[in-house]
Image (cartoon, rainbow, N blue to C red):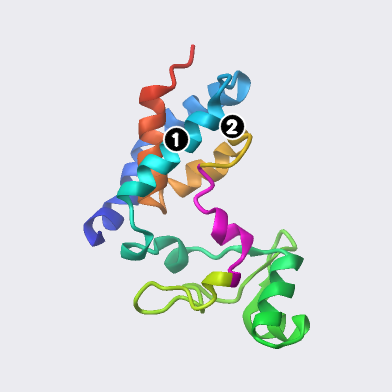
């Protein structure tokens, strides 16, 4: 996995122009059953991919924390939301709550998440390759191909299976 993660940013960069072009076409005229196809690709990939061997998303990026996330996680810690925010979060340039530091504070050395049951929505949905209206989040997916080996593989397989004119 270490070797894969080391090479991933370069592989994603090499494919960036091609992927950007593909996603631009996809946004203009998404295939009829795109979300269903993406669900299948996502499920196939995650039968092969074990996030616990990687956790690169948790090591290199931080999720956005919605107000619901903050409420749920602070309750888990038996804290007031303001105390949770003060301890773990900061407000970024987009005015979103994000982690103060990366790697994620809640990631253990074994790649397990200490708040897995109450983790943020962004973590639950990562890498977002099975989301509804997938064609609308192509920029997120493009970024994720440099972080998540599964997202990279899904996009490569997607380009083979989904023929765009």
In this view, the residue in front, 60 or 108, is 108
Crowding at mark 1 (Cα within 10 Å: few <14, some 14-19, many 20+): some
Image coordinates for residue 43, horizontal then vertical, percent: 42, 42
Image coordinates for residue 94, horizontal then vertical, percent: 72, 58
Residue that numbered label 2 is attached to: 135
> What residue is at 53 percent from the left and 42 percent from the top?
130
Q: Who comes first in sequence, dot 2 or dot 1?
A: 1
> What residue is at 55 percent from the left and 45 percent from the top?
140
Q: Is residue 160 left or right of residue 25?
A: left
Q: Is residue 39 left or right of residue 9?
A: right
Residue 122's disc is none
**Vertical order, 37 against 73 (above or below):** above
Q: Is residue 162 magenta?
A: no
Crowding at mark 2 (Cα within 10 Å: few <14, some 14-19, many 20+): many
Q: CA distance from mark 2 to mark 1?
A: 15 Å
The residue mark sitting in front, 2 or 1, is 1
* Highlighted magenta segment, given as a residue range: 118-129
**Vertical order, 82 against 162 (above or below):** below
Query: Can residue 15 be seen in the rendering of this structure?
Result: yes
**Vertical order, 19 against 45 (above or below):** above
Q: Residue reaching furthest top?
A: 165
**Vertical order, 87 against 20 (above or below):** below
Label 2: state its secondary structure. Answer: helix
Q: Quadrant of residue 124?
A: bottom right
Q: Quadrant of residue 157?
A: top left
Residue that numbered label 1 is attached to: 40
> What residue is at 34 percent from the left and 48 percent from the top?
47
In this view, the residue in front, 27 or 40, is 40
> What residue is at 41 percent from the left and 49 percent from the top?
146
């Amino acid at each position: 996995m270490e070797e894969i993660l080391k090479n991933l940013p370069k592989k994603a960069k090499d494919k960036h122009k091609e992927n950007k072009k593909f996603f631009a076409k996809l946004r203009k005229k998404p295939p009829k059953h795109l979300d269903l196809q993406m669900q299948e690709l996502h499920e196939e990939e995650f039968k092969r991919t074990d996030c616990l061997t990687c956790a690169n998303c948790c090591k290199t990026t931080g999720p956005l924390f919605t107000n619901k996330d903050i409420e749920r996680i602070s309750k888990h810690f038996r804290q007031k939301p303001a105390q949770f925010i003060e301890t773990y979060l900061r407000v970024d340039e987009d005015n979103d709550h994000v982690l103060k530091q990366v790697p994620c504070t809640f990631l253990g050395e074994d790649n397990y998440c200490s708040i897995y049951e109450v983790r943020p929505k962004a973590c639950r949905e990562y890498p977002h390759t099975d989301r509804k209206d997938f064609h609308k989040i192509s920029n997120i997916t493009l970024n994720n191909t440099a972080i998540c080996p599964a997202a990279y593989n899904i996009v490569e397989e997607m380009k083979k299976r989904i023929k765009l004119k």
